[in-house]
Image (tube, rainbow, N blue to C red):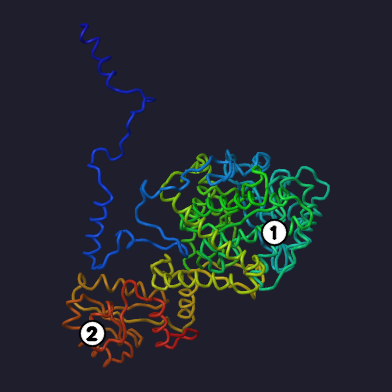
Amino acid sequence: MSSTDQQAPAAADADVPAEHEVPEDLSLAGEFDPVTRDEWRALVAGVLRKAGRENLPDPVEDALRRPVAPGVTVAPLYTAEDAGDLPVGVGVPGVPPFVRGARPAGGPAGSAEVTASGGAEGGASGGWDIRQRHAHPDVAVTREAIAVDLENGVTSLWLVLGEGAIPVDSLGDVLADVYLDLAPVTVQGVGAGGGVGAAEAFLDLVEGRTDLASGGSLGLDPLGVAAASGERQDLSGLAGVARRAAAHPGLRTVVVDGTVFHDAGASVVEELGCSLAAGVAYLRALTDGGLTVDEAVAALEFRYSASADQFTTIAALRAARRLWDRVGEVSGAAPEVRAQRQHAVTSSVMTTKRDPWVNMLRTTVACFAAGVGGADTVTVQPFDAALGLPDSFSRRIARNTQNLLVEEGHLARVLDPAGGSWYVESLTDSLARAAWDWFTEIERAGGLPAALASGLVRDRIAQAWDARAERLATRADAITGVSEFPNLTEKLPERRPAADVLPGGGLPRVRAAQEFEALRDAADAAATRPAVYLATIGPIARHTARATFAGNLFQAGGLATPAGDGAVGFGDAGTTVACICGTDKDYASDAAALAAELRAAGATQVLLAGKPDLAVDGVDGYVFAGCDALAALRTVHAELGLEGVQA
């Protein structure tokens, strides 16, 4: 071999950088010419004008802003310019202000709790605490379900005690096979006075033990009960219970349950602000009862909802820690106790009864967001939670959702993965500021108890829900399987009814799908399924788009949608309501005549799939993308004489 041949491989290798070598300048999309924000805006404006938008705002991206909460919107694009003076990536995980996380390493906040909560085989060692909720009144069923959960990845338990749930006097039997030194337990009492009874039952059970796993809670939340019931609650006894609980390090006394406000229709801003106000009220009650500020702060755990709006959930959890750190700082708490302990629960508001299988997707996204947002503990509600008590399959899916994200997806290996994102940091700051404004408004009104009694909280949450309800009605916020792509032939799983944990009489409880599901229920109750006849014009290629749209809309109200060419087939459809479907051009030439033909055939209401500016003679109404779908469906229900629905 020649010397040239011997040197050739070395020369080739010299052109290939070693794996550990990183270029000094790493240019993303470096093969493309740089684009300025003004150039992007010009392109956006052009697209919007082609879509018929005139009088565009300045800057043009404001036309594409989307509301996420009162006073908080998100833009379609974020760059370094938007960061401005934001505290981007402020601090480090485990250090005030805790925006980037309450813990410096994997596992629940606090090194003692990391060791104690990862004991179950297959648990999320190094991740968050996987907490499963149990409320089945049959002790044998609950005991077996707990055993299966702990053997398959669940690391802590949430037990609902009281009438209709786990009997209080059976708590010892339910936990007989549980290693309480490994699995933390949180209890929650049913009804207005159930919380104290549940807390005392658990304290009696563990009396004298010194090895109780850290990370559990007695679940007392009198202000949550006050919000749900509309009746004032006494906070004076909390300090006594907290002193008794102090015999078990890491056992918290109070849960500041923000989900009570979320379930009433609150946006994330109201939920955060109310939780801050509740936390401050509890600090006052505990310190008035003789606890130090540090002891009072350490007695609290915060429970928040996690929704399928993943970035809002991520930003909300980050904002909550920042806000609570500020409360602790002003109150004089030591930095090491100011990290907010967060328990995230997948949203009940987003859960549907119809097509409940889609809930698996919603809870997966919500769980992902809770983990990325830095929650210490996460509960994934079973996909059938809105129908009643879950079965073994739905509990398995709920726990495995978390197991897969932690063990297979390694989601917990990266702390604050959203940190530094201009979008997430901007949204975190916006939510924190809006929630702080709401919190201070509550404080000016005399604190949360006074704000609940005066109706301030109820009115503010109602305003937020009204805005959300409008987006739901127009399907701007679509609900897959309910307001979009409904399945009229579905067979729902049957479940045993679950007990109402909180009393009624105060804040309402809402679900996003409730109005559409009420229409479905009314249609299902009819002797034969009511229908809207789709009268198509022209060949399939021309009418398919609008016929598909109309069919999807009417089926969201539980209405069948038989179709035919013009008025042919109307007589066999078994209905008095028809909807004309075609193109604008076909409408101009044939729709008025078809409307008259349908009326002659017995139609009492004729709709048209298109916008009102088409102004077709003989048509009673129009359905189109962005219309009030609920109003249209209620009108049709009323026309068909379905009971329980008002137009």
Using residue 599 as the reference point, say whether residue 508 is left or right of it.
right
Q: Relative to 277, is 177 above or below?
A: above
Checking the image for residue 338, the label placed there is: none
For label 1, the crowd category at 10 Å Cα-Cα, with few meaning under 14, some 14 to 19 and many 20 or more, is: many
Q: Nearer the viewer, residue 637 or 376?
A: 376
For label 2, the crowd category at 10 Å Cα-Cα, with few meaning under 14, some 14 to 19 and many 20 or more, is: many
Q: Quadrant of residue 583?
A: bottom left
Q: Residue at x 67, y 69 (%)?
A: 226
Q: Nearer the viewer, residue 489 or 403?
A: 403
Q: Is residue 52 visible?
A: yes
Q: Relative to 373, is 558 above or below?
A: below
At label 2, which amino acid type do we have? Val
Q: Earlier in the sequence, mark 1 or mark 2?
A: 1
The reply to whether the C-beta atoms of the residues labelled 1 and 2 are less than 8 Å apart is no
Using residue 269 as the reference point, say whether residue 594 is left or right of it.
left
Checking the image for residue 282, the label placed there is: 1
At label 1, which amino acid type do we have? Tyr
The image position of residue 103, as x and y in percent, is 59, 42
The image position of residue 481, as x and y in percent, is 43, 66
Q: Furthest residue to the top? A: 2
Residue on which the image places disc 2: 616
Q: Is residue 124 visible?
A: no
Q: Quadrant of residue 209?
A: top right
Q: Relative to 183, is 641 above or below?
A: below
Point out the image quarter for the C terminus. bottom left
Using residue 404 as the reference point, say whether residue 634 is left or right of it.
left
The image position of residue 235, as x and y in percent, is 74, 63
In this rendering, which labeled residue sits more in front, label 1 or label 2? Answer: 1
Query: Which type of secondary structure does the marked residue at label 2 adopt?
Result: loop
Point out the image quarter for the N terminus. top left
Instruction: Give the mark count.
Output: 2
